[in-house]
């Protein structure tokens, strides 16, 4: 039995780790070196920077991040100290894919431009981009994939970034934060894109040069922009926010199921590492509070998919909440941005929804693209 210090935004963390010992749950800003001094396990999300300054006087033996990314973790220091580390790679992948699909269907409705026949360029084909490449063709999209690490490892089916920029009607970014991806999309890349391109970023804010993007948006060259991530979070460029088509506060992966899957992955890793018999029934938790069945209008129309997807996840609501920052005093923007993430409303994975009344002409699209339970 030992002490676990955990971020309060890790769902069900107290319930999950109760069998391992005492669990102390805190907001991210309160996880300090003093708090960690007597901890054996530290569980965080992306806000907490885990490095020598946090752990130098602690007895922590295991660090887990309930997030797919780990750029907030000094892994070299953890290796030096012999501290075990794990993160929830892929836990929220389906959530991000569903965010992207929702955004594309909304843009299609806004611009009265069918998705069928358009070319979707996916930059980064790991857990998220790879799953998007499987689901997006159900909407009639032609897929181009770019992922230099996978291509260099011998995987086939990839094109270079220049081809993505020149040939794609839609470009979506799913790359990790690194020196190679910093400002991957800068002035020349933006100017190389097809006029009218739709540009989406759900990876890291610094993958796009936000200042340059803001200037390019003034020219009308880009047809639509969807940003879930921003440079200088939690203080995004409010001028850029005014110009994007849809803007959200880094919540693409924040479905109930995606976040809970992160907890499950940490729980399995901790119990395995310490040789503890797992007792938490997470499957029961996943079955709680399932959304009621959706009865769709069986008569297909030009906006049928948009109407259905807004029942599953209405991206407009997140955009409206984000735009509240435009009326927030500058010195309170960071606090408000964090609150939007911390107090994010419940959103279930599409696969937890049951839908009836699906037109036969759209059944395959809904089943294979949205992955809802079709009844």
Image (cartoon, rainbow, N blue to C red):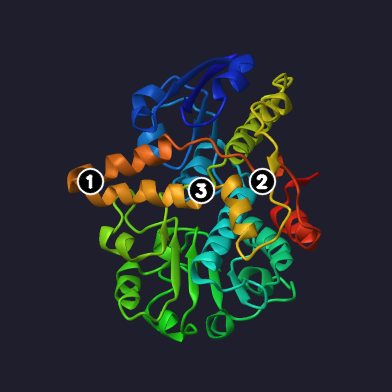
State the SS at label 3: loop
Q: Residue at x 69, y 48 (%)?
A: 296
Q: Is residue 184 visible?
A: no
Q: Position of residue 263 (x, y in %)?
A: 60, 32
Mark earlier in primary sequence (2, 1): 1
Task: Please say if 240 is above or below 15.
Answer: below
Q: Residue at x 69, y 58 (%)?
A: 131
Quadrant (top left, top right, bottom left, bottom right) of the C terminus: top right
The dot on residue 70 is 3
> Cα distance, mark 2 to mark 1?
33 Å
Residue 150 as seen in the image, left or right of residue 64: right
Crowd rating for badge 2 (residues with CA inside 10 Å; few <14, some 14–19, many 20+): many
Q: Nearer the viewer, mark 3 or mark 1?
A: 1
Q: Secondary structure at mark 1?
A: loop
Residue at 67 percent across and 73 percent down: it is 116
**x%, y% of residue 89?**
62, 47
Callout 3: few (<14), some (14-19), or many (20+) C-alpha neighbours within 10 Å?
Answer: many
- Are the two marked residues, 2 and 1, in contact with CB atoms closer than 8 angstroms? no
Give the Cα distance between marks 3 and 1.
Answer: 30 Å
Nearest the viewer among 252 and 368 is 368
**Any part of residue 143 in sight:** yes
Would you name the residue on which mark 2 appears? 350
> In the picture, residue 278 is in which quadrant?
top right
- Horizontally, is 60 left or right of 153 in the view? left
Which residue position holds label 1?
328
In percent of width and height, residue 145 lies at 65, 73
Residue 78 point in image, percent of width and height: 50, 40
């Amino acid at each position: 039995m030992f002490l676990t210090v955990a971020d309060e935004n890790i769902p069900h963390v107290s319930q999950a780790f109760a069998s391992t010992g005492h669990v102390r749950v805190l907001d991210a800003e309160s996880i300090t070196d003093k708090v960690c001094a007597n901890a054996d396990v530290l569980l965080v999300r992306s806000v907490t920077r885990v490095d020598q300054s946090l752990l130098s006087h602690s007895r922590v033996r295991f660090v887990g991040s309930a997030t797919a990314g780990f750029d907030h973790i000094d892994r070299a220091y953890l290796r030096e100290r012999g501290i075990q580390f794990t993160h929830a790679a892929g836990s929220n992948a389906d959530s991000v894919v569903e965010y992207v699909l929702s955004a594309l269907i909304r843009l299609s409705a806004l611009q009265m431009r069918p998705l069928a026949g358009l070319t979707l360029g996916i930059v980064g084909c790991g857990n998220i981009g790879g799953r998007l490449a499987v689901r997006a063709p159900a909407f009639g999209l032609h897929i181009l994939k770019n992922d230099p690490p996978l291509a260099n490892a011998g995987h086939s089916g990839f094109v270079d970034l220049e081809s993505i920029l020149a040939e794609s009607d839609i470009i979506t970014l799913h790359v990790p934060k690194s020196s190679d991806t910093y400002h991957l999309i800068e002035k020349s890349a933006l100017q190389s894109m097809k006029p009218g391109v739709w540009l989406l970023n759900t990876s890291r804010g610094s993958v796009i040069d936000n200042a340059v993007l803001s200037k390019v948006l003034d020219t009308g060259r880009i047809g639509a922009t969807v940003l879930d991530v921003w440079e200088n979070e939690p203080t995004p460029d409010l001028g850029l926010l005014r110009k994007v088509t849809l803007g959200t506060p880094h919540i693409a992966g924040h479905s109930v199921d995606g976040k809970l899957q992160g907890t499950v992955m940490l729980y399995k890793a901790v119990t395995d590492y310490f040789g503890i018999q797992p007792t938490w029934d997470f499957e029961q938790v996943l079955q709680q509070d399932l959304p009621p069945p959706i009865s769709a209008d069986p008569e297909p129309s030009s906006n049928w998919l948009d109407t259905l997807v807004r029942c599953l996840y209405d991206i407009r609501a997140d955009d409206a909440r984000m735009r509240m920052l435009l009326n927030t005093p500058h010195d309170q923007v960071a606090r408000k941005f964090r609150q939007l993430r911390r107090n994010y409303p419940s959103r279930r994975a599409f696969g937890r929804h049951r839908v009836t009344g699906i037109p036969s002409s759209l059944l395959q699209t809904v089943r294979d693209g949205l992955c809802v339970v079709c009844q």
